[in-house]
Image (cartoon, rainbow, N blue to C red):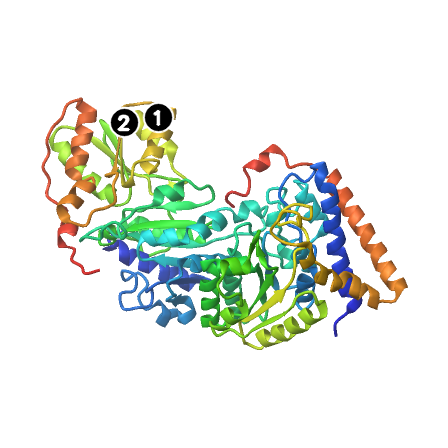
C-alpha cells in the first residue's frame, strides 16, 4: 500500500533541500553547476518508493531528487555540492556526479544518455546471477536523441534484462522543445518499437508513478523485462542554476501554471492530518539544517586528494 | 624457458580459457566472438565450453556495448569486450573516455570499472584507411586508462591475464601480424606487469623502442644494423600506460641514442611521448618513426611507403649513430607477403 506520509516526507525533503540550495547559491559557496529537480520530484519519489534498498538506480546530472529518493545520504550530498572532503565523492564529483553505492544510487553522469547502457549492463548481471534485484535508469527526453538510447533499448529488449527505463520528459532538452528536435514527439511509441512494454503517464502524480513502477518491479522480479515508462513532468527553474527563466524567451510562464496546480508537495501534504504534516515538516527542516551545517563545517580535501582514485 | 611454442593468438586463447575457468565472472563479448572465425581463433567455442552468457555476439552498437561492459563491471563482473578492428573503438570513445577512465575519480573511489577492451590493428592486404589504424596514442592521452601493446606470445597471455585481474579499465592493442608470431608460452597462469618494458635484444650504440608489430620489424632492422657494425638495443615498452620511463631511460643512458618506432602516427603519439619523457631526464640525439602523416592508402605501392619497415628503421638508426646515410636492403616480411584476404 502506498504510504502517503512517507511520500510526502520524501517530496518535502527534496523540495526544501533544493530551495535552500537555490537560496544559498548566490553566496558562491557552491562553486559548480547545479541542475535543480524542483517540479520533477514526484517521478523520483514514486519510482524509488517502489524499489528495495538493494535495487539500483542510475541517474542524470539532474539527480538531486533521485539520490535523495533512493536513500542517498543528505549530509554527504550537500558536502559534495560544497566541494568538501566529507562529500559523497570527496568533493571531486559535485552535483552532477552524485553517488551513494551503499544506497543503490550509482554514479550520475554529466554527458546525456551515458548511463542508459550502464543500467542495462548492471541489470544483465542481475539476470545472469538470478539475484532478483532490479535496475532503474532515469533519463530525460533529450537522451532519446542520443544513439546510446536506441542501442541500449534494443539490447535490453534482446536480452530481456530487468531494467525499468524511466523517461522524465520535461519537454525540453536545455532550451529546445521536443518538437524542435523530433518530428514525432512520442517516446512511448518509439520504445514500443523495440518490443518493450511502454506507457506514458502523468509524472506529477506520485501515487500513480508508484503504482505503475510497483507493478513493473513485480514483473521484472518474476523474470520479465525490460519496461519503459514515460513520465510527463515539468522543470520549474532554469536548466542549470537556481533561478526561474520564464523571461528568457524560450517558454512562457503560463506553461507552468497547470503543473503548480498539480504540485504533489502541496496536494499530498493537504491529504495528511495537519499535526502529522507539521511534525514531518519540522523533522525534515531539522535534518536539512544539520546537513547544511555539516557541509559548512567540513574541511576541503587535502592537496594529496588530487592524485588519488585515478587508479585503484 | 618453457619449450612450449605457440602463436600469440593461441596464447590469448589459452589465457582466456584459463581465466574463465578460474573466475565465473569473466566473460567475452563483441561482434563475431561466437562465429566460426572466433575473433582470430582467440574465442573459439568459449560459448560451448562456458555457456552462451560467457561468450556472445552483439548488435553493431559499440557505444552502448561499451557502456554495457561498464555497467556489468560496476556490478562486479569482468567483461572482455572484443573489437575485431581498433578503428571501431572510436564508436566507443565516449564511454571509454568520459566514463570508464573517470568513474573511480569522479565518484570519489566508490565505483570500479574493471573492463578489458581488446582491439586489433588490422594491417595487411589492403585494409585501407578505416581498417588498419593504431589509435593507442589517443588513449594514452587519457588519465585513468591502462594500455598494453604486446609483441610476443608470452606477453600476449601474461598481459591478458593481468588485464582481466586489474581493477581498472584496460585496453589491449593487438596486431594481426603479431597474432601469428610464434614463441614460448608457459602452460601455467602468469601475469605481465603494467609499467614495465622488456629488452628484446641488448646493444650498445642505439636504443630502438618499438611498439607492437614494430618490435618485430625492429628486431629485423637490428640484424641488418649488426651486419653494418651497429649494435642496437631493442626495447618493447609492452605497457604504454603506465609507461616504463625509468626502464627506457636506463637503456638510453647506456646507448646515448634513441629511435622510437610506432605502429601509429607520430604527432602527439606514443613515439612523441616516449621521446619527450626520456629527453626530460636524459637528452640525447633521437628520432621518431611511425605511419606517414596521411590516411592509410589501400594500394600496395603506396602502403609500402606508409609504414616503417626494417630497411627504413635501419637507415634511420644508422644515420643517428654515424651522422651519415647508408642504404640497406631487406625483403618484405613473410607474414605480410603470405597474408591473403578477403578479410
Q: Quadrant of the C terminus of chain B?
A: bottom left
B222 relative to B143 in the view: left or right: left
Q: Secondary structure at mark 2?
A: strand
Residue at which label 1 appears: B279
Q: Which mark is residue B286?
A: 2
Q: Secondary structure at mark 1?
A: helix
Residue A272: x percent and y percent? 84, 67
- Using the image, name the chain to which the residue with label 2 belongs: B
Task: Reply above or below: A159 against B329.
Answer: below
Residue A129: x percent and y percent? 52, 69
Q: Which mark is residue B211?
A: none
Can residue A247 be spotted in the picture? yes
Residue at 15% x, 49% y: name it: B299
Q: Nearer the viewer, residue B126 or B115?
A: B126
Closer to the chain start, of discs 1 and 2, is 1
Residue at 33% x, 63% y: name it: B43
Residue at 65% x, 40% y: name it: A83
Residue contact at pointers 1 and 2, CB within 8 angstroms: yes
- Using the image, name the chain to which the residue with label 1 belongs: B
Q: Nearer the viewer, residue B27 or A69?
A: A69
The part of the image, by quadrant, that contains residue B266 is: top left
Residue B111: x percent and y percent? 56, 52
How many residues crowd mark 1 within 10 Å: few (<14), some (14–19), many (20+)? some
Can residue A126 be spotted in the picture? no
The part of the image, by quadrant, that contains residue A301 is: top right
Task: Reply above or below: B127 against B204.
Answer: below
Q: Nearer the viewer, residue A212 or B44?
A: A212
B88 relative to A143 in the view: left or right: left
Residue at 39% x, 38% y: name it: B243
Q: How far apart are the alpha carbons under marks 1 and 2? A: 9 Å
Q: Nearer the viewer, residue A53 or A181?
A: A181
Residue B324: x percent and y percent? 15, 23
Amino acid at each position: 500500500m502506498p504510504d502517503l506520509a512517507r511520500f510526502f516526507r520524501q517530496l518535502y525533503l527534496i523540495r526544501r533541500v533544493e530551495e535552500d540550495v537555490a537560496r544559498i547559491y548566490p553566496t558562491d559557496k557552491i562553486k559548480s553547476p547545479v541542475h535543480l529537480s524542483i517540479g520533477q520530484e514526484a517521478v523520483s519519489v514514486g519510482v524509488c518508493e517502489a524499489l528495495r534498498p538493494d535495487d539500483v538506480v542510475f541517474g542524470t546530472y539532474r539527480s538531486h531528487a533521485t539520490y535523495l529518493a533512493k536513500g542517498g545520504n543528505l549530509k554527504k550530498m550537500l558536502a559534495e555540492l560544497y566541494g568538501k572532503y566529507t562529500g559523497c565523492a570527496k568533493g571531486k564529483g559535485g552535483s552532477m556526479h552524485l553517488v551513494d553505492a551503499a544506497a543503490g544510487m550509482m554514479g550520475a553522469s554529466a554527458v546525456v544518455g551515458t548511463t542508459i547502457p550502464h543500467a542495462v549492463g548492471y541489470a544483465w548481471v542481475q539476470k545472469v546471477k538470478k539475484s532478483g534485484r532490479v535496475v532503474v535508469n532515469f533519463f530525460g527526453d533529450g537522451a532519446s536523441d542520443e544513439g546510446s538510447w536506441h542501442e541500449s533499448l534494443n539490447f535490453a529488449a534482446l536480452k530481456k534484462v530487468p531494467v525499468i527505463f524511466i523517461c522524465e520528459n520535461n519537454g525540453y532538452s536545455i532550451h529546445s522543445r521536443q518538437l524542435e528536435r523530433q518530428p514525432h514527439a512520442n517516446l512511448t511509441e518509439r520504445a514500443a518499437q523495440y518490443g518493450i512494454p511502454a506507457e506514458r503517464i502523468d509524472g506529477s502524480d506520485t501515487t500513480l508513478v508508484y503504482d505503475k513502477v510497483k507493478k513493473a518491479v513485480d514483473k521484472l522480479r518474476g523474470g520479465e523485462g525490460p519496461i519503459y515508462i514515460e513520465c510527463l513532468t515539468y522543470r520549474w527553474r532554469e536548466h542549470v542554476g537556481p533561478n526561474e527563466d520564464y523571461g528568457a524567451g524560450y517558454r512562457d510562464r503560463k506553461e507552468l501554471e497547470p503543473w503548480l496546480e498539480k504540485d504533489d508537495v502541496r496536494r499530498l501534504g493537504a491529504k495528511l492530518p495537519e499535526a502529522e504534516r507539521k511534525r514531518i515538516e519540522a523533522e525534515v527542516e531539522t535534518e536539512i539544517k544539520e546537513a547544511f551545517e555539516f557541509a559548512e563545517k567540513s574541511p576541503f580535501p587535502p592537496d594529496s586528494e588530487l592524485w588519488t582514485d585515478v587508479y585503484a | 624457458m618453457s619449450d612450449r611454442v605457440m602463436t600469440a593468438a593461441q596464447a590469448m586463447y589459452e589465457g582466456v580459457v584459463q581465466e574463465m575457468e578460474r573466475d565465473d565472472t569473466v566473460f567475452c563479448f563483441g561482434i563475431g566472438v561466437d562465429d566460426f572465425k572466433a575473433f582470430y581463433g582467440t574465442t573459439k567455442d568459449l560459448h560451448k565450453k562456458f555457456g552462451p552468457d560467457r561468450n556472445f555476439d552483439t548488435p553493431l552498437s559499440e557505444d552502448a556495448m561499451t557502456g554495457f561492459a561498464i555497467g556489468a563491471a560496476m556490478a562486479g563482473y569482468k567483461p572482455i569486450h572484443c573489437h575485431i578492428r581498433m578503428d571501431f573503438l572510436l564508436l566507443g570513445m565516449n564511454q571509454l573516455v568520459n566514463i570508464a577512465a573517470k568513474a573511480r575519480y569522479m565518484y570519489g573511489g566508490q565505483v570500479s570499472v574493471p573492463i578489458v577492451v581488446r582491439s586489433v590493428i588490422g594491417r595487411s592486404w589492403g585494409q585501407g584507411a578505416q581498417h588498419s589504424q593504431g589509435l593507442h596514442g589517443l588513449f594514452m592521452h587519457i588519465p585513468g586508462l591502462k594500455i598494453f601493446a604486446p609483441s610476443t606470445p608470452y606477453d600476449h597471455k601474461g598481459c591478458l591475464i593481468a588485464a582481466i585481474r586489474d581493477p581498472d579499465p584496460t585496453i589491449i592493442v593487438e596486431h594481426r601480424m603479431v597474432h601469428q608470431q610464434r614463441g614460448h608460452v608457459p602452460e601455467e597462469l602468469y601475469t605481465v606487469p603494467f609499467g614495465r618494458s622488456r629488452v628484446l635484444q641488448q646493444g650498445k650504440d642505439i636504443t630502438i623502442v618499438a611498439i607492437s608489430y614494430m618490435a618485430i620489424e625492429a628486431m629485423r632492422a637490428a640484424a641488418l644494423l649488426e651486419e653494418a657494425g651497429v649494435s642496437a638495443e631493442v626495447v618493447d615498452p609492452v605497457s604504454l600506460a603506465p609507461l616504463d620511463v625509468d626502464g627506457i631511460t636506463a637503456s638510453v643512458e647506456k646507448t646515448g641514442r634513441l629511435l622510437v618506432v610506432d605502429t601509429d602516427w607520430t604527432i602527439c603519439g606514443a613515439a612523441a611521448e616516449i621521446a619527450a619523457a626520456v629527453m626530460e631526464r636524459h637528452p640525447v640525439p633521437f628520432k621518431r618513426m611511425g605511419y606517414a602523416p596521411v590516411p592509410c592508402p589501400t594500394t600496395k605501392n603506396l602502403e609500402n611507403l606508409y609504414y616503417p619497415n626494417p630497411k627504413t628503421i635501419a637507415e634511420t638508426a644508422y644515420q643517428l649513430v654515424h651522422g651519415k646515410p647508408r642504404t640497406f636492403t631487406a625483403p618484405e616480411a613473410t607474414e605480410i607477403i603470405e597474408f591473403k584476404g578477403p578479410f
